Amino acid sequence: MDDLKQKYLTQIAGAGDEATLETIRLAAVGKKGEVALKMRELGGMTPEERQVAGPALNALKNEINSALAAKKAALADAALDARLREEWLDVTLPARSRPRGTIHPISQVTEEVTAIFAEMGFSVAEGPRIDTDWYNFDALNIPGHHPARAEMDTFYMHRAEGDNRPPHVLRTHTSPVQIRSMEAMGAPMRIICPGGVYRADYDHTHTPMFHQVEGLAIDRDISMANLKWVLEEFVKAFFEVDGVDLRFRASHFPFTEPSAEVDIRCSWEGGTLKVGEGDDWLEILGSGMVHPKVLKAGGIDPESWQGFAFGMGIDRIAMLKYGIPDLRAFFDSDLRWLRHYGFASLDQPTLHGGLSR
Ligand code: PHE
């Protein structure tokens, strides 16, 4: 009986799965198992022998049964452990792999500029990139013979013979949106208009398509002082510096009177631009008080209203802020360049959250 016990306990201990365990159970304590056969032998024994062998066989049967039960539970535990290990999830992993696309610096800077002017009450206006020469020129006090038309290297749209629609151009600046916004909103108003513009020009600081942001504020007594404050606030916020020096340089645009180009104090020490300190000046935009003829063209009475306007190159200020050396790279769609100069897609620029991180 000791041999039987030893044999089955060893087999049970070595069983690797439930099926093996069941085979062992049948062979040991099943109806036709070895223990059952032994029990049958009890019939041929003397009552004395039976009294010793009977309880011993029962004890053996019980012992084998409880070893089987214990092993079964252990196998189930091990199986559960294995499953848990296999089905383990790191719930801290991001749901999707990190996006590989980036936000183009022009889009980023457009968002930054929009966030800053939105804070000052400017809404975003838009206009068509193909516009009539009236919106692009005449309404802005640039009549047909005006040299500014030639200076702007305008792309004219082809016109079929007999087509008597007004001539269309690829807008050479965002200023036509001044007129369209005046028509749509009337006075008072405060808008910016970011968007693409076109001029036939190509070298390392000029591309045939580039981006501007127009600003326009009209009210009863708006002055150059308001313009200066707005631009100072903008430059400080955009370049993320505490103080700036702005210099207004007398200039000329047909659509503003007086007109000024605006420079900011900067230094180029060590080849990197620092805004707000140093002895250099950097031109960043053109501006002025909206010409009365332009107000009139937009349907606004210049006797009752006045305003300021400015126009700024988005590509240019993006290059300055982010140290991007060549304008043409903006339009090359080179993925390596985009990975280097691009921005994370989920970081929306806001004034309180930080413009660029
Ligand atoms: N439209 C001008 C340009 O493209 C910029 C400008 C806009 C100047 C508004 C003054 C006022 O150069």
Image: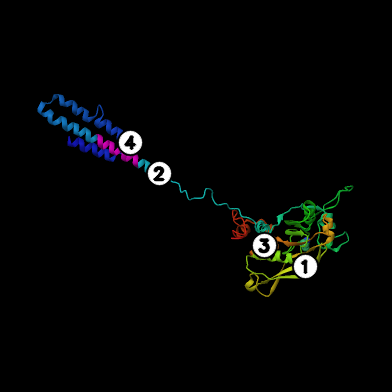
Q: Which residue is mark 4?
A: 18
Amino acid type, residue under disc 3 in the picture: Ala
Q: If the image is split into quadrants, where does the N terminus sit?
A: top left
Which mark lies nearer to you, 4 or 1? Answer: 1
Q: How far apart in space, not on screen, are marks 4 and 3 (Cα)?
A: 70 Å
Q: Is residue 28 visible in the rendered structure shown here?
A: yes
Pointer 3 local density, CA inside 10 Å: few below 14, some 14–19, many at least 20:
many
Which mark lies nearer to you, 4 or 3? Answer: 3
**Res 303 quadrant in image:** bottom right
Overall secondary structure of the magenta section: helix
Q: Secondary structure at mark 3?
A: helix
The percent coordinates of residue 275 (x first, y second) are 65, 69
Disc number placed over residue 129 in the picture, else none: none
Pointer 2 local density, CA inside 10 Å: few below 14, some 14–19, many at least 20:
few
Q: Secondary structure at mark 2?
A: helix
**Earlier residue among tags 1 and 2:** 2
Q: How far apart in space, not on screen, are marks 4 and 1 (Cα)?
A: 90 Å
Q: Is residue 325 visible in the rendered structure shown here?
A: no
Q: Which residue is mark 3?
A: 318
Pointer 4 local density, CA inside 10 Å: few below 14, some 14–19, many at least 20:
some
Q: Which residue is mark 1?
A: 260
On the picture, is 338 further left or further right than 43?
right
Q: Are marks 1 and 2 in contact (CB under 8 Å)?
A: no
Q: How is the image coloured?
A: rainbow
Q: How far apart in space, not on screen, are marks 3 and 2 (Cα)?
A: 52 Å
Q: Which residue is mark 2?
A: 84
Pointer 1 local density, CA inside 10 Å: few below 14, some 14–19, many at least 20:
many
Find the magenta span and give its range.
65-77
Amino acid type, residue under disc 2 in the picture: Leu
Along the line of sight, which residue is nearer the eye, 157 or 4?
157
On the picture, is 59 further left or further right than 140?
left
